[in-house]
Image (cartoon, rainbow, N blue to C red):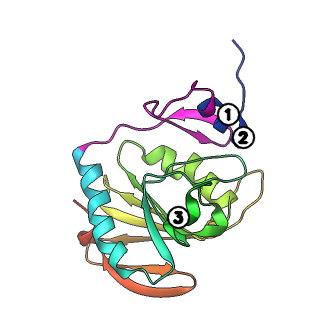
Amino acid sequence: MSVHRFTVDQYHRLGELGILVEDDRVELLAGWIVPKMVHNPQHDAAIQLLDEAIRRLLPNGWRLRIQSSLTTADSEPEPDLAVVRGPARGYLSRHPSAEDTALVIEVADSSLARDRGTKLRVYAGARIETYWIVNLVARQVEVHREPSGGEPEPIFRSCRVYSVGEKVPLLIDGRVLAEILVEDILP
């Protein structure tokens, strides 16, 4: 059996042709179509807590998207949350790109290895400014900043881990909007 890497356009075409449908729990990561992880109640609760903590803090012109696609050069991940620039109607004919995105958040339990591996490389390669991993296993928030972009192994040059009792800065468009207690976003 041979394997095939897909471009973003080919991935979209699979959807247009009905080969991939909405019920297929997959996403495109670095050219590979991969299954999305199953969500447990704690994962979903963390997403709700993040939504409640962040949405109200965003300035005009910024939106919080939940489990919606972003488009990069070689991927179309569906992060748990993403803060993107522009009106909601601005994304009727396209998904936000990295240039539209200030923050991506993944809630990690069984997906921790993928979130620290493939997804981290996808977001760093796309130069998304800030990437949070809300680590439910260790009960902490990993904040990755300063993406390298490029190949062969994109990274974030800065990583700071915030534990219960500490506050995570919500940095959007170069400014700290607020600080959020770690325990306020953990189930």
Mark number for residue 13? 1
Query: Residue at 72% of width from left, 40% of height from top?
Result: 9
- Binning the other alpha carbons within 10 Å of mark 3 as few (below 14), some (14 to 19) or many (20 upward) gives few
Camera-side mark, 3 or 2: 3
Judge whether 72 appears above or below 129 on screen: above
Residue 169, by quadrant, is: bottom left
Q: Secondary structure at mark 3?
A: helix
Query: Residue at 60% of width from left, 40% of height from top?
Result: 28
Question: Residue 128: within the magenta?
Answer: no
Judge whether 12 appears above or below 141 on screen: above
Pointer 1 or 3: first along the chain: 1
Please name the amino acid that badge 2 sits on: Asp
Camera-side mark, 1 or 3: 3
- Residue 131: image location, x then y, percent: 52, 65
- Residue 135: image location, x then y, percent: 36, 57
Q: Mark 1 touching mark 2, by CB under 8 A?
A: yes
Image quadrant in which the C terminus is located? bottom left
Residue placed farthest to the right in the image?
Answer: 151
Task: Mark yes or no: residue 7 visible.
Answer: no
- Binning the other alpha carbons within 10 Å of mark 2 as few (below 14), some (14 to 19) or many (20 upward) gives few
- Residue 100: image location, x then y, percent: 61, 68
Q: Mark 1 touching mark 3, by CB under 8 A?
A: no
Q: Which residue is mark 3?
A: 89
Query: Residue at 38% of width from left, 60% of height from top?
Result: 134
Question: Residue 28: within the magenta?
Answer: yes
Q: Which residue is mark 2?
A: 9
Q: Which residues are magenta?
A: 16-40
Please name the amino acid that badge 3 sits on: Arg
Please name the amino acid that badge 1 sits on: Arg
